[in-house]
Image (spheres, rainbow, N blue to C red):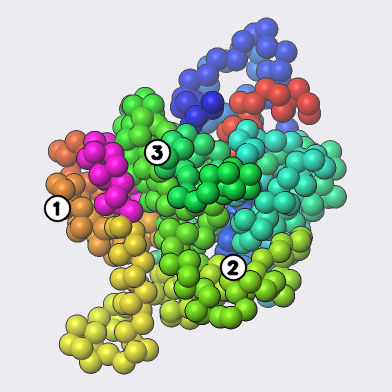
Amino acid sequence: MRHAPPPRQTVNIQTTDPHANRKGLILAVNAGSSSLKISLYRNIENGTSHSQITSEPVELLLVSNITNISAPPASFSFTLGAHHTGHQVKKEPVDSIRDHTSAFAHFLDYLKDEAKIDRSEIVHVCHRVVHGGDYFEPVVITSESYDHIERLSDLAPLHNGAALSVIKTCIEILPSATSIAYFDTSFHRSMPPYIASYAIDQTIAKKRGLKKYGFHGLSYAYILRAVAAYLKRDPNTLNLIVMHLGSGASVCAIKDGKSLDTSMGLTPLTGLPGATRAGGVDPSLIFHYTNKAGRMSHDRSQAVNVHVTQAEEILNKKSGWKAITGTTDFGEVVKNMKTNAEKVAQGQATEDEAKWAMAFNLFTDRVIDFVGAYYLKLEGKVDAVVFSGGIGERSVELREFVMGKLACVGISFDKDSNQVVDEKGGEVVEIGKPEDERKVLVCRTDEQLEMARECFFERAFWEES
Ligand SMILES: Nc1ncnc2c1ncn2[C@@H]1O[C@H](COP(=O)(O)OP(=O)(O)O)[C@@H](O)[C@H]1O
Ligand SMILES: CC(=O)OP(=O)(O)O
Ligand SMILES: [Mg+2]
């Protein structure tokens, strides 16, 4: 069984390794529910016969973030060099971006015109694929693996279809590059069967693969590695409660460096609410919401075949804080909540004014449900509580709320440090009290780097290229 990969701070490449010559560029593509994040890397160890790699094996050449894909106009950014220190060529709303395919096409134009990168230099394209089913290891895209991912699209309707549409484009436009799928589900294979199973007929469950898979695994693997490096600890000794809070949000309990439990399930729908996702609801709710729950949805916004019922469409695309407030942007939710705070406190807010606090309170309430449960599951032995994802990394208010609740178990945070996270560089920022053994951290997750790094270290991929 392959667990979370060990830290790769120091790696030996043997002189005799015939595959040490790992030349070429790696493109890493992360199709999130509302975003497409693309990073291009160059291998630092080009052609070296023997070396000690002391930091990342790959160097970031450029990064493009396309956000708000599900709530147009999408915002497109293109930065040469690293995220925060690089030279931003462009950041603008782009009307022509309506889905992940058009977002990727827009990126390719910039790659050629602005970065002057010859596409033929790209040897591998790593794709984040959210649902891998029983595929755990990264796989080269062949017609068989493509079909496998396509069959799973119905179990990740906001994701697998989007990833496949980008994979299709890559196969057509970058024919000399190998497309490789990396799965979010892989990290959670360590969940014990009693945690991963649902209390249903086990014969049917096994036959149909009806169990908890868990998602955001590339992010959790990256965070585990980054936190271990920051704390100077062996990742296999770490117990963490990690919150990945973005348009899709989940919490993971990591015990001894392995996923013990996570809040998403068979699909990325359950657990916490998301931008357009309901999160966990009583399954009966949907039959009271609509009498067409079982009918197929007519939504054809996905480029590849995704077959979902109206129930799934409502709960995945027409719910979440978008349904409560009208916006998918949690930053807006927080801003408007603060504007209306006084009226809400005085009981004088209209429903329209109170909806922002309602969305914030509902979301954070569910976050602490899982944090509390995982604290007990880890028997209080927690080395660090980690905030991550677009909301976890940026929302001072959300972190303050969650940390306020954790005070009752003695995990405290520093209010001032929490305020200035945005101003600090680095992948991990500490917001706990320095003297506390149990750390409170914000980790800027990077699923693209996780894939590129794994790709660099996988000899088989370089043998094939
Ligand atoms: N300043 C902010 N405060 C709170 N939430 C924010 C802020 N900025 C961005 N966000 C939220 O982060 C989300 C994006 O998170 P991210 O993890 O990047 O998304 P995805 O789930 O698509 O990968 C946005 O949709 C928005 O809701
Ligand atoms: C699994 C999932 O919900 O991913 P994202 O948050 O990127 O949409
Ligand atoms: Mg994401």
Q: Residue 250 appears at what percent x and percent y?
A: 43, 54
436 left or right of 135? left
The amino acid sitting under disc 2 is Glu
**If the image is split into quadrants, where does the C terminus sit?**
top right
Q: Is residue 386 magenta?
A: yes
What range of the chain is rendered magenta? 370-388
Q: Residue 245 appears at what percent x and percent y?
A: 42, 57
Mark 2 or mark 3, earlier in chain: 3
Quickly name the residue at label 1.
408
Quickly name the residue at label 3.
260
Front residue (pair 314, 63): 314
The amino acid sitting under disc 1 is Cys
The amino acid sitting under disc 3 is Leu
Q: What is the secondary structure assignment of the residue under circle 1? A: helix
Q: What is the secondary structure assignment of the residue under circle 2? A: helix
- Residue 328 visible, this orientation: no
